[in-house]
Amino acid sequence: MQPVSHAFKENARRALEDPALQRALGNLRAGFPSRRAAAIARLPEFDALRDCGRDLKEHAIAHLDFYLEQFEARVQERGGQVHWARDSEEACHAVLEICRRVGAKMVTKGKSMVSEEIALNEYLSANGIEPVETDLGEYILQLRGEHPSHIIVPAIHLNRDQISDAFEAHHGQYGYNKRLEEPSELMNEARQVLRRKFIAADVGITGANFCIAETGSTVIVTNEGNGDLTQLLPKVHVVISSIEKVVPTLEDVCTFLRLLSRSATGQELTVYTTFSTGPRRPEDPDGPEEFHVVLVDNGRSQMVGTEFQPMLRCIRCAACMNYCPVYGAIGGHAYGWVYPGPMGAVLTPQLVGIEEAGHLPNASTFCGRCEAVCPVHIPLPKMMRHWREREFERHLSPRSVRMGLAGWAFVARRPALYRRLTGTAVAVLRALAGRSGRLRSLPLATGWTAWRDLPAPEGRTFMQRWQRGEGGGAS
Amino acid sequence: MSEARSRILDTIRRGLGRGPLPEAQQATLRERLTNPPRNLIPARALAAPERLLGLFRDMAEEAAAGITPLSRESEIPAAVVNWLEAQGLPASIVTGEAPLLSSLAWEAAGIQVQRRAARAGDQAALSVAFAGIAETGTLMLLSGPENPSSLNFLPDNHLVVLAASTVVGSYEDAWAELRRQHGSLPRTVNLITGPSRSADIEQKLQMGAHGPIRLQILLLAPSLEAAVR
């Protein structure tokens, strides 16, 4: 997917003015946070599990080379193959080679954000192989020629009439000509259409929530069962996973399973948690004859040892975006690439470059809810600040920002001047605000006052009040 | 591709400020992989054995699975027939080669049994769970001739026999039991918690997305003593 993150401001403005999107985002804000909160309230150990999850991921990353090699060795022992890919091109090529070797015409896909990241669908289509998304949300988006706007609920930005339109336009070829309105009817029609695809597919492609070094297993966590039909029925199962998904043992995965569903959908556990180890065994009556794992780096190895290393802990639960006031206002597409919300604001500049994605780490109020809900304690606001610093160091910030910061730095290094200026400013603002105590408009701050009033300062600075002995009862 | 492999591993090692892990450290980590320590397990999953069965039932029902309690294996065919009839389905099931099921009087119960992997159009499948996990009301099923994995996903209705004696508290307990009985993992291990669902359309939960629309657990608890491990 070609990033359009550089157009963030324009994307965000359009999103705010889109009534259908705003209606759909209301569903998100109403649902996820309360469901997560209810699930966590039932598990007193949740906070301790978060600490444990953080420590386990840090352990895995500190020994990532070792665990990747162990994982590879176990996959091979069980008759599977591991393909290493430095970038999107190598990853797509590896998948295409497998498809070509077995003469695949059509492949089914379970939901995989890494496959979005490497633009696998476009690659396969351009090479004459038809990819069919089978997750209901992803399927709807494929019909509409769109990309996901959320990492676990990809079609969160759509309302049902838009889905009705898409099915009506595309399902006639399968003999379904009646326009449907009810979610249950829409889902059932997709179920019938996709059933034929599951059975006809030559290759099934899934992502992985975890790769287990102990056993060489890959794990997917789903509610629909599409990922299972995708990997069970075709001759070949291809798993696409990024390198940081490796965890040591089955016991370690248990900790992440307890964190993931509760943080993501507020479920105790998702309906299907599936551990796939190698191809089918000689005595097995079903399952794939070949098992491949494509391990994708795409810039992640370069995060190891940097201030962005904690981002590699991410288990893709989406709690950070579900709680984010910015994501909740503009949705995922405004972020302009695969990963939206706070985790996307940190990851996207790493994967597509700060030149393209510099707006994203700036699109935050730093309210801190993302970090507060993160199941593995990723310091997201801190890492967004690191990106802002890098952007500044590389002279990528806008001139107005640079001049403003330079002016502030000049004054801040001169305490007497600083006090005099701030003292004047708060007094003037106080006087301007009058009795209401609020400013309806203010030059240089229209970005704020165009949408809301600015509460005026109380008239004196902290230092002035301190000197008058308003420091409280301490002395 | 081996060039990609060495480049990726080299970059990781450079980031970590070291070369390949020294042999002594590798040995420590290998020991951790061979004898995996347990991490924090919630108190809920450590409940007394006599409470685990009740917890399993509550959690499974909360996840929208149905439960049919049975006291003897011989009751299974009649229970299957009754349940199928209640759903308005023909008396026919697909199942695997599980010994527990093969000795039962299916013909006498008037039910057609086919022993094979699932195919498109199959309406109901019957499996035997390896374990039940009380913590979240989750079934653990193992692939193989006894329980082909396609039975878990392709038919609209999935019935699963679960012996109360195999209900454990935590996921960790189930893995321990799997390692003890089988040594290594089968091709597919399915943890199943309720029937298939999706909320992809306007966040409204709908049951039966791609997997079974209904999941019915036939809970075999011969007596209270047997239910207590």
Image: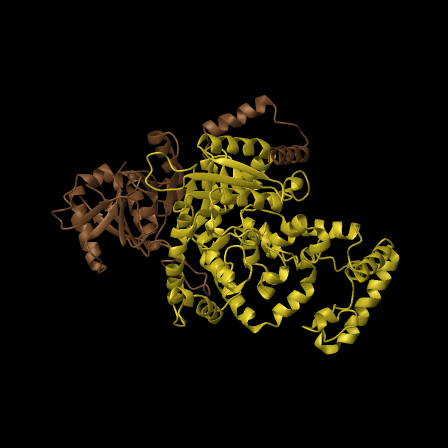
Determine the residue positioned at 39% across, 60% down.
A193
A462 lies left or right of B138: right
Give the x, y percent position of residue A403. 83, 60
Quadrant where the N terminus of chain A sits is: bottom right
Where is residue A368, by image quadrant?
bottom right
Residue B195: horizontal and vertical position, in percent? 34, 54
What residue sits 68% from the left and 32% below the top?
B17
Q: Is residue A194 visible?
A: yes
Q: Quadrant of residue B165?
A: top left
The answer to whether A356 appears left or right of A127 in the picture is right
Q: How many marks?
A: 0
Residue sitting at the far top: B24
Foreground residue, A20 or A226? Answer: A226
Residue B64 located left or right of residue A202: left
| Residue A289 in the image: above or below residue A265 | above
- Report which quarter residue B221 is drawn in: top left
Percent from the top left, x then y, of residue A28?
A: 51, 63
> What colour is chain B?
brown
Which one is in front, A345 or A56?
A: A345
Residue at the left extreme, as displayed: B108
Residue at 85 percent across and 63 percent down: it is A421
- Most extreme residue toward the bottom is A435
> What color scheme is it?
by chain
Q: Let me know if residue A225 appears in the view.
A: no
Q: Residue at x 55, y 62 (%)?
A: A146
> Tell me, what hue is chain A?
yellow
